[in-house]
């Protein structure tokens, strides 16, 4: 998916399937920017600005924006129309050092306090994500946050089914690896649901805008990648008993389950983040460690 609108340039631009381009209507873009509520002190990373439906109203608020767009035609058009507080980069966000770009952007002061100290900096993310790359982008952002602890929140357009997974609770059908790994980094809330008609061309699915508010991990996690490994092993066999699902990691899972107080007959989809984290710590503890 890509942000766009009837008031944007490149009226003859044909949406490209390989980039997952479905351009967001201006009225819906305005609702999203209102929900984001940019303020002095904010710095934005925008993923996939498209025709600029989100970029333009964000920029009008005065906040600095780093807009990363993979489509070179869209980049050329955007660069010619956007104000100086927007930096447009032609790149794949999964392969670009956005931290370096963001560190060079200076937040604005409040218009009526030009002589006052700058407000606290908040680095925020916004994006109308291509649906075929939503999960890789979410995991990439989570990894950046784990490394740099620099983001305040991320307001993202995703497929409704992905939003359901992100907001799922243990024991439900939608609860899985993505739920667990995003819960490590913060709290998810759904801001808006959008029909296919909110885009041009209309996709075949409904969409949701979610906001991930980043925060410290709610449980002890020494290694996020090990937690992901354990979660993937368990949820790949979610209907089996936990004792059986863990055999791809350890020959005898029973001592580990007993030590964490987890009934081996339970199903993986019932495990909370706290239980998964405790299990991961034990499974990967060096031999002989206390």
Image (cartoon, rainbow, N blue to C red):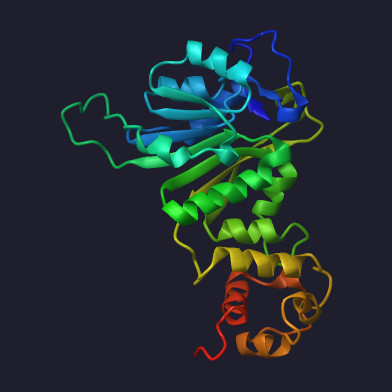
Q: Is residue 37 left or right of residue 19?
A: left
Where is residue 228? Give x, y as percent.
64, 64
Q: Is residue 214 shown to the viewer in this render?
A: no
* Camera-nearest residue between 36 and 86: 86
Task: Residue at 75%, 77% (x, y): give it.
Answer: 246
Q: Residue furthest left?
A: 115
Q: Is residue 136 shown to the viewer in this render?
A: yes
Which image quadrant: the N terminus? top right
Q: Is residue 168 left or right of residue 36?
A: right
Q: Is residue 284 left or right of residue 104?
A: right
Where is residue 13? Give x, y as percent.
69, 12
Q: Residue furthest top?
A: 12
255 lies above or below 150 = below
Where is residue 183? Give x, y as percent.
57, 59
251 lies above or below 155 = below
Task: Residue at 41%, 48% (x, y): give it.
Answer: 150
């Amino acid at each position: 998916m890509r942000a766009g609108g009837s008031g944007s340039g490149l009226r003859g631009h044909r949406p490209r399937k390989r980039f997952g381009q479905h351009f967001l209507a201006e009225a819906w873009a305005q609702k999203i920017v209102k929900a984001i509520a940019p303020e002095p002190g904010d710095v934005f990373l925008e993923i996939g600005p498209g025709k600029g439906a989100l970029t333009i109203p964000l920029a009008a608020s005065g906040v600095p924006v780093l807009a990363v767009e993979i489509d070179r035609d869209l980049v050329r058009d955007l660069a010619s129309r956007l104000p100086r507080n927007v930096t447009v980069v032609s790149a794949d966000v999964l392969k670009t050092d956005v931290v370096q770009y963001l560190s060079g952007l200076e937040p604005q002061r409040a218009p009526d306090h030009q002589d006052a100290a700058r407000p606290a900096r908040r680095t925020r993310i916004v994006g109308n994500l291509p649906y075929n790359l939503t999960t890789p982008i979410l995991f990439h952002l989570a990894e950046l946050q784990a490394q740099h602890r620099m983001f305040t929140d991320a307001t993202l357009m995703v497929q409704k089914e992905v939003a359901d997974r992100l907001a799922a609770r243990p024991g439900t059908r939608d609860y899985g690896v993505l739920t667990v790994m995003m819960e490590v980094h913060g709290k998810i809330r759904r801001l808006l649901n959008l029909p296919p008609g909110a885009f041009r061309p209309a996709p075949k699915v409904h969409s949701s805008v979610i906001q991930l508010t980043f925060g410290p991990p709610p449980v002890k996690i020494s290694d996020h990648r090990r937690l992901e490994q354990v979660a993937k092993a368990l949820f790949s066999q979610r209907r089996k008993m936990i004792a059986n699902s863990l055999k791809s990691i350890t020959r005898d899972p029973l001592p580990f389950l007993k030590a964490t107080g987890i009934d081996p007959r339970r199903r993986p989809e019932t495990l909370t983040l706290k239980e998964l984290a405790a299990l991961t710590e034990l499974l990967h503890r060096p031999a002989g460690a206390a």
